């Protein structure tokens, strides 16, 4: 099966009205229901990164937020944000379920690029719909996930004092209305703020199994890497979609903003 070339796109209403915005929100909800993700082009400049929360609230059906979104779309676009200083460099973020590590997974996430480096993959968003990816994993990996326990350790617990000291286990799977999804946090490529291992395996065997899992997820037809264009907003259903980001090199102007609900 060929790999999807891009995210499903949701069209913005050219002239905002109560009906066109209702249709737009319905299409966005359908994209999230069917694929776990949706891409909206050119919305970022019209509502501003600071209003991503209003978009998420409108998707949840909040009447006041729908009215607020209508006002934002009908108004003149806010000033474009300043590119600001160049990046000191950010490492890649591995595939993970947002906030699952601290026991507070979010529901929906909205990402946007407040500044981009055209023609590059700086800060590209990586996505895997695990409802689609799980049946495509090798039998060996599925057996490992079904019979072994994933464990994690947060090296600096000061921001999260409720977390256990040392290693702790989290369920490998989560239930969603559409089926079973992965509830995992893969380890950073370089030493980072957390560690991941598979209980009962040696360190080398655990690292190799996690590397193969990452590789199979990225080679699956459920994997998409999105390079940013100005104004893009990507919606993600965090209950089923793992996400990560590619590295941002030193000197890059790429900047991401996000909101979650």
Image (spheres, grey):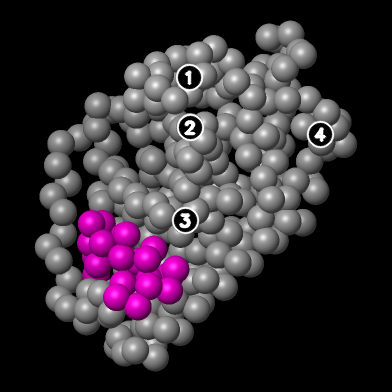
Q: Give the residue number, with chain letter if any, for mark 2.
A: 102
Single out the mark in the foreground, 2 or 3. 2
Above or below 187: residue 230: below
Q: Does the rendering let one see residue 192? A: no
Neighbours of disc 4 within 10 Å: few (<14), some (14-19), many (20+): few
Label 3 element class: strand
The residue that label 4 is drawn on is 146
Classify mark 2: helix, strand or loop.
loop
Q: Quadrant of residue 91?
A: top left
Disc 2 or disc 4, which is closer to the eye? 2
Q: Is residue 35 rendered to the left or right of residue 57?
A: right
Q: Which residue does the image show at 61% across and 51% down from the upper left?
A: 240
Whole-percent x and y of residue 45? 24, 65
Residue interval drawn in magenta: 44-65
Image quadrant holding the C terminus, namely bottom left
> Which mark, residue 240?
none
| Quarter of the figure with the N terminus | bottom right
Q: Is the C-beta separation of discs 4 and 1 under 8 Å? A: no
């Amino acid at each position: 099966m060929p790999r999807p070339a891009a995210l499903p796109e949701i069209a913005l209403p050219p002239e905002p009205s109560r009906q066109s915005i209702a249709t737009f929100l319905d299409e966005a909800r359908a994209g999230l229901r069917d694929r776990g993700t949706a891409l909206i082009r050119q919305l970022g400049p019209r509502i501003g990164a600071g209003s991503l929360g209003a978009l998420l609230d409108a998707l949840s059906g909040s009447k006041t937020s729908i009215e607020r979104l209508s006002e934002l779309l009908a108004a003149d676009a806010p000033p474009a944000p300043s590119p600001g200083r160049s990046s000191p460099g950010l490492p890649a973020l591995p595939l993970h379920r947002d906030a699952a590590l601290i026991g507070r997974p979010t529901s929906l996430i909205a990402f946007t690029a407040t500044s981009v480096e055209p023609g590059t993959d700086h800060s590209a968003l990586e996505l895997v719909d695990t409802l689609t990816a799980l049946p495509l994993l090798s039998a060996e990996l599925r057996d490992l996930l079904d019979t072994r326990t994933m464990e994690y350790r947060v090296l600096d617990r000061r921001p999260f004092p409720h977390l256990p000291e040392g290693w702790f286990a989290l369920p490998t799977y989560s239930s969603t209305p559409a089926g079973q999804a992965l509830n995992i946090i893969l380890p950073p490529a370089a030493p980072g703020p957390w560690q991941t291992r598979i209980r009962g395996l040696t360190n080398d065997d655990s690292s190799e199994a996690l590397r193969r899992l990452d590789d199979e997820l990225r080679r699956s037809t459920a994997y998409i890497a999105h390079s940013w264009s100005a104004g893009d907003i990507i919606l993600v259903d965090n209950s089923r979609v793992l996400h990560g980001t590619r590295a941002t090199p030193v000197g890059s102007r790429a900047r991401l903003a996000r909101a979650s609900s």
